[in-house]
Amino acid sequence: MTETKPRIHLICNAHLDPVWQWRWMEGCGEAIATFRNAVEIINEHPDFIFNHNEAVLYEWVMKYDPPLFRQIQQLVSKGRWFIAGGWYLQPDVNLPPTENIVRHILEGKKFFREQFGVEPKVAYNFDSFGHSSGLPRLLRDHGYEFYVHMRPDKEVLDLPASIYIWEGSDGTRIPAHRIEVGFYHTERNNIKQHIQKGVEIARNQNRDTAVFWGLGNHGGGATREDLAIIEEMIREERDVDIFHSTTDHFFESISPVIADAPVYKGEVQRIFTGTYTSMARLKRKAVQASSAVVQMEELERHHPGGEDEESAGLRSKKVDQIWKDILFNDFHDILTGSCTRIAEEDAMELYGRAMENIREINMDILSRINRSSKKLRAHIPVSLYNSLEGLSKFPVEFECMADHRPFWDEEKVLVLSDRKGKIIPSQEEQPDALLPFHRWRRKVVFMADKLNKGVHHYGLNPESVEDLDKSAMLYLTGDFGVKFRVVKDTADSWGTDTWKWNESVGEFMELADSKRVIAQGNIRTIQESELILHGSSIILRQISYAGWPVTEYRILVNWHGEHQRLKLVIPVDTGLDSCLCEIPGGTISRKADGQEHCHGTWMHLSKEEAGTGSSLSTINRKPGGINIAHNGLHGYDFVSGELRLSVLRSAAYCHWHEYKLPNHSESSGGHLSGPSPEYMDQGLHDIRLAIWRSGPESPAPESISSWLNAPPLVYPHLPVGNG
């Protein structure tokens, strides 16, 4: 308890979503206007302090209004403007992989250290929709001492106190604070009520209390009207001191309270469960881009140098831009699918730019490596970069042209061999292109075995079919009986106040005579079938591999639902009732409760709940469990006998449940009733899924996830050697 009067820490900020109901250009303009307003008010009020985080907003100001940025630098040095939080932006902290969360911290800290010479102690994500129990470790690992959040609010999640000790899934602890007065902002007419509420808490609990104020979430910040009210309350209040403060100062002042704060263990969840699936394309592309940039950096790390300083500098800037493009889309109103359709398109274009830059850098590095390598003599040289760890065996596939022109006169196959001339068993399959040019385009598949991380070179050479040693064709099974169920989903974009979706409106049915074998050889067998329901269709391809326990599914969905959700249903043993999931910063075990939860890109189902510190390798090798990996199906529910992954949901774009959607199925009689809403996730979607049973030789879930989302890079026709 404090020996003097308790205090109200007035922490002025301007919560500003770079993207939400608007595109980034509007967010940028509002950031400049908000920061300019803050500078003016600081100069008018000698005691006022402005707080703001999110490096991306400062970058915009630095780029588009340099004089304003220099003014902010001066105010920071004088203690009148406080750099709070210190992240790149306020991302969703449920969906991005661990590496992304780390980069948000590192990018933000680097920017604020270089431009302002500061490093905040307090991290905050005011508006993020739930908080992974892996965060305490990530925060502690990067020097943070305190964490502030708003959601989930007290009506949704009962915390033991607004100031508490948060213990993560691995036992790491960090003091935390859930905002207890209002949200992260004030309206134009409620500053007095907020401060009065803060005074009441401070009096009753005899401790310092924080009141976050300032217009948001389209920026704004402090107003002169609010400051006049604040100054009057400062003069009149007798029991509590009211003053302008910062998040770090508030943390320092409540150390006596923190010492006795109750402990809360586990994840700070849940709210807005629809965001685990909304705008599913973004989520899958996020997984792809994040996996690809990490793979690219691994390639460069193992093969650095070999270029002049200027070229290295340009590539470093390009890598920085790639990460910033990806991190920007992690924002809690983009990746979650709560923005508008045009903002979704902008985000997809950002991912496209990132992926193209990744491809250019990969090509540059591989070309440099190949130039310095011993020459490979082959009809078609093939270079492969493997970044996978902990996976001794995995399939590789790629396409190539068989020659400069087709083999018109005779049928030939392409035989794969390593540098020593050893034949690598492979099979050819139908390529993507459907041209009748005598199999000019080829798809080649082989099983890599004990392939070290790094660059490897192979050769493809044509041989006549009659000269080829024909291996036995294998017809393999491994069907897990996956089903596709459509459930009713009338919730808004966020899935507000909805915790489960289980009201079935039908299951996709297989068309008669549609099941067929489309590829069969000594590496794998692919079965294909077509399913339909209510105008939507699914092409399901099940892939079984020889001598490899993983069954892979490639699924092409043509979706036309409205107010519906597509669930991919995996029947499982009724004895499996615990789910170990990947989450940002670690893993978490959850019981089968039938409610919608969020996870990363893999999970392990078992009969026993995994305890803290359990070895994933050991758990996976216990017989009876099932592993699942995928390319971004983050939402799921689990009940006895079924795991149900949320694939798509067709909520209206940027729709809040209090707005009643117009019903154009009924005649409006010519009266205004609003435009027809646009629905998410319409059209084509590519889904990848892998399922395999646990056992002594089972591959680890995180390794199969890496294989699915960042498979080995393969470059046919890229010359190897100079001489």
Image (cartoon, grey):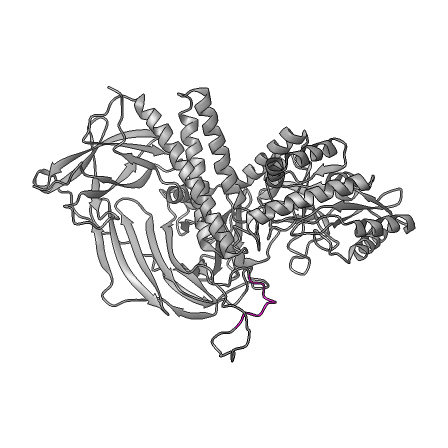
Q: Position of residue 133 (x, y in %)?
A: 59, 47
Residue 35 appears in which quarter of the rendering?
Answer: top right
Residue 71 appears in which quarter of the rendering?
Answer: top right
Towards the viewer: 93 or 145? 93
Q: How many marks?
A: 0
Q: Is residue 376 above or below residue 547?
A: above
Q: Position of residue 242 (x, y in %)?
A: 85, 46
Determine the residue positioned at 84% across, 52% down: 229
Left/right of residue 257 with respect to residue 503 in the rendered view: right
Left/right of residue 363 with respect to residue 175 in the rendered view: left
Q: Is residue 340 above or below residue 670?
A: above
Q: Is residue 267 magenta?
A: no
Q: Position of residue 434 (x, y in %)?
A: 22, 51
Residue stretch in magenta: 655-662
- The majority secondary structure of the magenta stretch comes to loop
Q: Quadrant of the C terminus?
A: top left
Q: Is residue 605 visible?
A: no
Towards the viewer: 429 or 354? 354
Left/right of residue 1 with respect to residue 155 in the rendered view: right
Q: Quadrant of the N terminus?
A: top right
Q: Is residue 365 above or below residue 395?
A: above
Towards the viewer: 2 or 578? 2
Q: Is residue 657 magenta?
A: yes
Q: Is residue 514 visible?
A: yes
Q: Position of residue 544 (x, y in %)?
A: 28, 50
